[in-house]
Amino acid sequence: MSKLYCNQSSKFLPIFAELEDLRSTCIANCVFNIFLTYTAFMLNIVTIYAIHKTSTVPKTLKTLLLSLACSDVAVGLFSQPLYTFFLINWLRLDNPGCIPKQVGTILGSLFSAASFLGVVAVSVDRFLAVHLHLRYQEFVSRRRVVVVVVSMWVYSAFVSLVTLWGLLSAWDLINIITVAFGFIITLVVYIRIYQTVRRHKNHIQSMQIRDEAQSEEIKNLTALIKYTVGIFHVYLVFLVCYLPLFICMAVIQFYGSSIVLKKLFLFLLTLVFLNSSLNPVIYCWKIKHIRHAIIDILRKMSWISN
């Protein structure tokens, strides 16, 4: 089974005869990933603590963000160090065996799938929050969200382990269906969110004109819209980081591999890993309460060090 996987992975990853041509690409990616491994791990650890400490973020959203941050920590802890290990071996003109590559694919697939499904889930959650508004808590409880999060991780583990059974065609098909289904859902969700937010903004303006006493509802709606805009930025960055890799893999699958495409593939893998370092930055930038919690943590850390 590992030999079958090795033959398949040679479409995307360097083979021994190509290592010299890919040397500069490996050096650049190695430098980037050593830095990004540290940022992905440290920034997400701080973010997890900040989300946990923030009481003003809705519990359902907090659960989904914690799951997303955990998958990003795992990328920095497992996937990126393993990818860096491969890059260093390729620089030494030593091609790792099939089993390490398969382990790398399983871990990468697990955490990437968990991140992707996490982004889809948090997008759907924000749609329900905006669309249902006051009825949101009736339909979306923390217990249900926990069930969704556990289901996402179980499904991600199942998808990543399919390669162990040698069902590579089935693995490709499952990935294509999952990605296509996820992108369609998020596209529809954000179109509906945009329409609903426009309607809410008109409603807010009319309430301000009609009755200033309804300021509490206006405040809640405004906060809800801000959270939703913040999550939309997470989705956009995810698209920018992941979509080029999916396109590159599709091109290699249909038209065959080349040195240029393999160079591009290695850089796009690094772009995917960059996503795990960018998510905490977006939370800090776009979600005020998480930003304040992170600033408080950093102040305490600087005070302790002094």
Image (spheres, grey):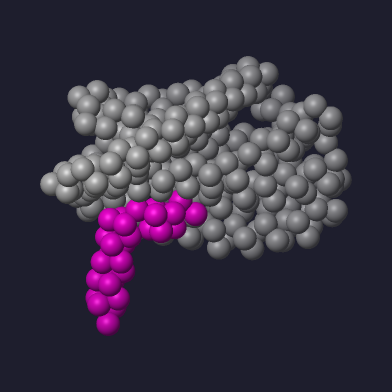
- The image shows residue 104, relative to residue 150, as above or below, that is below
**Residue 12 appears left or right of 150:** right
103 part of magenta stretch: no
**Residue 192 appears left or right of 159:** left
Q: Main secondary structure of the magenta part?
A: helix
Q: How many marks?
A: 0
Query: Which residue is located at x 63 percent, y 19 percent?
Result: 173
Query: Which residue is located at x 55 percent, y 26 percent?
Result: 184
Q: Position of residue 198 (x, y in %)?
A: 40, 38
Q: Position of residue 87 (x, y in %)?
A: 68, 53
Q: Residue furthest front?
A: 210
Q: Is residue 203 visible?
A: yes
* Residue closest to the eye, 19 or 138: 138
300 part of magenta stretch: yes
Range of magenta residues: 278-306
Q: Position of residue 151 (x, y in %)?
A: 37, 24
* Residue closest to the eye, 267 or 120: 120
